[in-house]
Amino acid sequence: MTEALDTATTSLIGALNDIDDDVERYEAAEALKARIDREVKDVKANVAKSLYDGRSWAAVGKLLGVTGSRAEQISRAAR
């Protein structure tokens, strides 16, 4: 992970831990996780689509360490 991502992660976890109410902190953690999951899926889809330019899905899969079929699924933000 890059230093910028480490800093951002530390900040987010700190903000969650600053919430005094346990239930509110739990709910905020769940909401944050859901948002990050959605947005990371979109980032991964964009990476796969970018890598596909001029390559086969099999080649993209090899670069990402997955099968070509999975690379194509990633590009569609599937699962």
Image: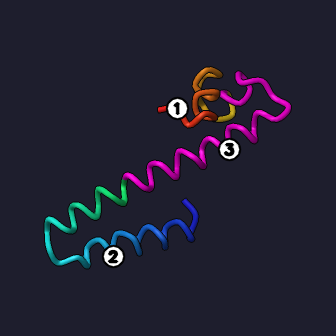
Residue beneath the point at 58% across and 25% down: 70
Task: Point out the frontmost of discs 1 and 2.
Answer: 1
Q: How many neighbours does mark 2 have within 10 angstroms: few (below 14), some (14-19), or many (20 or more)?
A: few
Judging depth in this view, the residue of 67 and 74 nearest the camera is: 74
Task: Point out the frontmost of discs 1 and 3.
Answer: 1
Q: Are marks 3 and 2 in contact (CB under 8 Å)?
A: no
Up the image or down, 40 lies above or below 17; here it is above
Residue that carries the numbered disc 1 in the rendered image? 78
Q: How many neighbours does mark 1 have within 10 angstroms: few (below 14), some (14-19), or many (20 or more)?
A: few
* Cα separation between marks 1 and 3: 14 Å
Residue that carries the numbered disc 2 in the rendered image? 15
The image position of residue 32, as x and y in percent, is 36, 60
* Amino acid type of the residue tagged 1 in the rendering: Ala
Residue beneath the point at 47% across and 48% down: 38
* Cα separation between marks 3 and 2: 29 Å
Magenta part of the protein: which range? 34-61
Up the image or down, 49 lies above or below 32; here it is above
The image position of residue 2, as x and y in percent, is 58, 64
* Amino acid type of the residue tagged 3 in the rendering: Val
* Amino acid type of the residue tagged 2 in the rendering: Ala
The image position of residue 34, as x and y in percent, is 38, 52
* Cα separation between marks 1 and 2: 30 Å
Mark 3: secondary structure: helix
Mark 2: secondary structure: helix
Query: Colour scheme in the image?
Result: rainbow
Q: Give the number of the disc on residue 47.
A: 3
